[in-house]
Image (tube, rainbow, N blue to C red):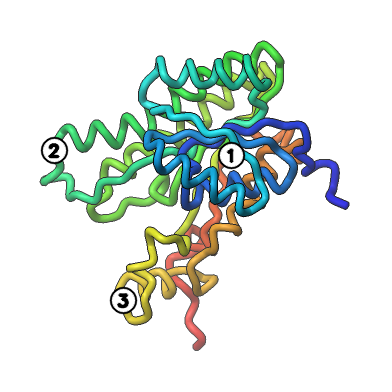
Amino acid sequence: MSHPLFDLNGKRAFVTGASHGLGMAMATGLARAGASVFINGTSQERLDKAVEQYQSMGFSVHAYRCDVTNEAETENTVAQIENNIGPIDILVNNAGIIKRVPLLDMALQDWEAVIKTDLTGVFITSKAVAKRMAERHAGKIINICSMMSELGRNSVGAYAAAKGGLKMLTRNMATEWAQYNIQVNGIGPGYFATSQTAPLRSEGHPFNDFIVNRTPAGRWGTPEELQGAAIFLASKASDFVTGQIIYVDGGILATIGKPSNE
């Protein structure tokens, strides 16, 4: 029997960008804890495939074609969920993009696309959901940050700027919305074994060696290892936790380097 503090039965969770990857892993974790899950995306084909994947795992999800950078589309999607199905109790702002281009070579339109999706999109979606949560005096918002909320890295300047901004947006949302009993926190994933990182994880690949040697845990994370943090921040267990970023990174941010065996 699951602990009642972590029970999400009867709760509704809107997880943006959860048609694949880490978003799908977190959405699946919330569903396993009992939540009804709603996802969005900009590609109907990808959404249809995602629904099939969720169904193959035993979960029924509702999918909406919606671009989080479009305020009208987002407001309409949130209204559809709330009016036709029920209140959104949990919002996970996971939708995001990255463009790996050195800052001196980055076009303004690419910079703006990353900021608009990874930071402004969170503002747009959170505002649409939080104003309804405020009326009910209850809600959980989880923003998916990054280790780039804390660290820089070559060629991801726009992404790091957006994720650093998201860390501070999380804290400001927590500050302003605590009066409405809305808890706002973040999760900062480390490096995870997904289909997107598969080419980098082959044995002997320089980046694979770098990550394994840089991580005290000595390995990449599995997507399922994000589920615990998501369930915690979505549940009653975190009712007095707000404005925090939980880094799920195998210890990378805790150290200047993986300890040697000497």
Question: What x and y, as percent, mark residue 179?
Answer: 66, 17
Tag 1 residue? 244
Measured Cα–Cα span from mark 2 to mark 1: 33 Å
Please say if 253 is above or below 34: below
Q: Can see residue 176? A: no
Q: Residues within 10 Å of mark 1 (few under 14, many from 20)?
A: some
Secondary structure of residue under mark 1 = loop
Q: CA distance from mark 2 to mark 3?
A: 29 Å
Residue 26, position in %: x, y? 58, 47
- Say if mark 1 contacts mark 3, CB within 8 Å: no
In the image, residue 217 sits, relative to residue 189, either above or below, namely below
Q: Nearer the viewer, mark 1 or mark 3?
A: 3
**SS category of the residue bearing label 3:** loop
Q: Which label's residue is closer to the chain start, 2 or 3?
A: 2
Where is residue 96, by image quadrant?
A: top left
Residue named by callout 3: 205
- In this rendering, does residue 220 appear at all? yes
Element type where label 2 sits in the image? loop
Q: Which mark is residue 132?
A: none
Amino acid type of disc 1? Gln
| Residue type marked 2 | Ala
Task: Please state if 231 lies on the left or on the right of 10 as rendered.
Answer: left
- Name the residue type under label 3: His
Query: Mark 2 sits on what residue?
Result: 107
